[in-house]
């Protein structure tokens, strides 16, 4: 291959890497890691398959959102975030659509393998997750414009991802997994909210009425802070319940996740006054916070499991 072709291939790969929005992938990896830790036992291939499902769904929803918002005219040159593949012309709408569908197929195959190995009830749950992925910005009435995206994201990318990852390993969902899923879901919604606060001007102009657009910038910022704080409250509440009854709550070692709080300070402060592109570090900081919180919580759960056995 000539140097020119190699450069073209590298540039092409860079375009698609940019298009999958790597900064958002914490929203898919983090709950799976926590769910695996909460399971109490690890089946390696099932854990890998759960990671594949999570990553594929996240990349799939990113690309589907890119495609739908591009063809609907929601993404324009006035967009404050990074340019999108479809709207910018870096990739054709057809290519982005096929890539999104390919990700959904990969997630479906990995999920089917997990369902066959554990419970066929995972099939309708997985189908609902894929439908939620597509209808976020697709279909006749995308729910991203109905102000309910936060609830759907909390349920599927937080609760279901965490509890589901625990289930495919242990074939049951412990109280620790449920408590962890709430904390992770709240942080993942905070990532979404940081993104939507930044996009209020362009979303409003395009008629995309996200919850942030509906409640306004000030309340959206308060909601963001509330979500971050609530994730830590859920963690402490779970441990408090666990002290009274360890079968119904989180182990004390889960409090290790509190050490991630310093990472929350800067985005919590910045979201109060940042405007436009200044809000991008809030999104990045929230993703880093989510990863740190998840890593520390997972370590705490693993240590608790090791010391209990």
Image (spheres, rainbow, N blue to C red):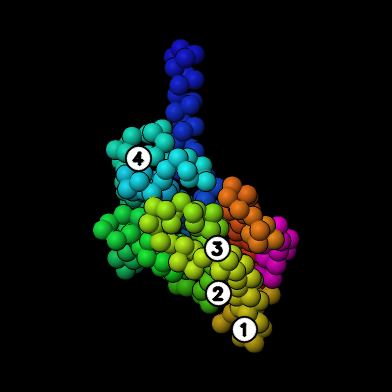
92, above or below 230, in the image: above
Which SS does the magenta portion mostly show?
helix
Do the numbered discs 2 and 3 sit on residues whose CB atoms are within 8 Å? Answer: no
Q: Which residue is mark 4?
A: 96
Q: Return the disc, 3 or 4, that comes first in the chain's sequence.
A: 4
Q: Quadrant of the N terminus?
A: top left
25, above or below 124, in the image: above
Q: Residue at x 63, y 64 (%)?
A: 297
Q: Which residue is mark 3?
A: 217
Left or right placement of residue 158 versus residue 141 in this view: right
Do the numbered discs 1 and 2 sit on residues whose CB atoms are within 8 Å? Answer: yes
For discs 4 and 2, the disc positioned in front in the rendered view = 4
Q: Nearer the viewer, residue 43 or 74?
A: 74
Q: Return the disc, 1 or 2, that comes first in the chain's sequence.
A: 2
Q: Assess whether residue 258 is covered by the magenta stretch.
A: yes
Q: Return the disc, 4 or 2, that comes first in the chain's sequence.
A: 4
Q: Residue at x 29, y 65 (%)?
A: 124
User: In x, y percent, where is residue 192?
Assistant: 50, 59
Q: Secondary structure at mark 3?
A: helix
Measured Cα–Cα span from mark 3 to mark 4: 31 Å
Q: Nearer the viewer, residue 178 or 14?
A: 14
Task: Give the residues drawn in magenta, as a range.
Answer: 253-268
Q: Which residue is mark 1?
A: 241
Neighbour class for label 3 at 10 Å: few (<14), some, many (≥20)?
Answer: some
Measured Cα–Cα span from mark 1 to mark 3: 36 Å
Q: Residue furthest left?
A: 140
User: In x, y percent, where is residue 262?
Assistant: 73, 60
């Amino acid at each position: 291959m000539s140097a020119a072709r190699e450069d073209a291939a590298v540039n092409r790969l860079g375009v698609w890497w940019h298009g999958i929005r790597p900064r958002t992938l914490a929203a898919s990896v983090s709950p799976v890691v926590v769910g695996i830790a909460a399971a109490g036992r690890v089946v390696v291939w099932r854990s890998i398959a759960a990671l594949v499902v999570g990553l594929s769904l996240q990349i799939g929803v990113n690309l589907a959102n890119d495609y739908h918002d591009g063809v609907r005219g929601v993404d324009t040159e006035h967009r404050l975030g990074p340019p999108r593949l479809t709207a910018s012309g870096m990739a054709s709408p057809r290519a982005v659509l096929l890539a999104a569908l390919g990700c959904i197929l990969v997630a479906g195959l990995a999920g089917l393998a997990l369902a066959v190995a554990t419970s066929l009830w995972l099939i309708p749950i997985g189908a609902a997750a894929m439908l939620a992925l597509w209808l976020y910005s697709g279909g006749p009435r995308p729910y991203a414009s109905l102000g309910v995206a936060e609830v759907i994201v909390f349920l599927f990318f937080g609760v279901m991802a965490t509890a589901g990852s625990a289930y495919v390993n242990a074939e049951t969902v412990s109280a620790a997994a449920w408590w962890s899923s709430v904390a992770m879901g709240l942080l993942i919604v905070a990532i979404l909210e940081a993104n939507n606060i930044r996009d209020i001007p362009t979303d409003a102009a395009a008629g995309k009425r996200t919850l942030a657009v509906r409640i306004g910038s000030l309340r959206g910022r308060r909601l963001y802070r509330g979500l971050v704080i609530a994730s830590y409250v859920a963690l402490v509440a779970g441990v408090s319940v666990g002290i009274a009854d360890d079968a119904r709550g989180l182990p004390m070692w889960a409090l290790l996740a509190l050490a991630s709080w310093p990472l929350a300070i800067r985005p919590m402060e910045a979201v109060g006054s940042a405007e436009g592109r200044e809000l991008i570090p809030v999104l990045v900081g929230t993703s880093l916070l989510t990863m740190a919180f998840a890593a520390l919580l997972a370590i705490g759960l693993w240590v608790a499991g090791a010391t209990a056995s």
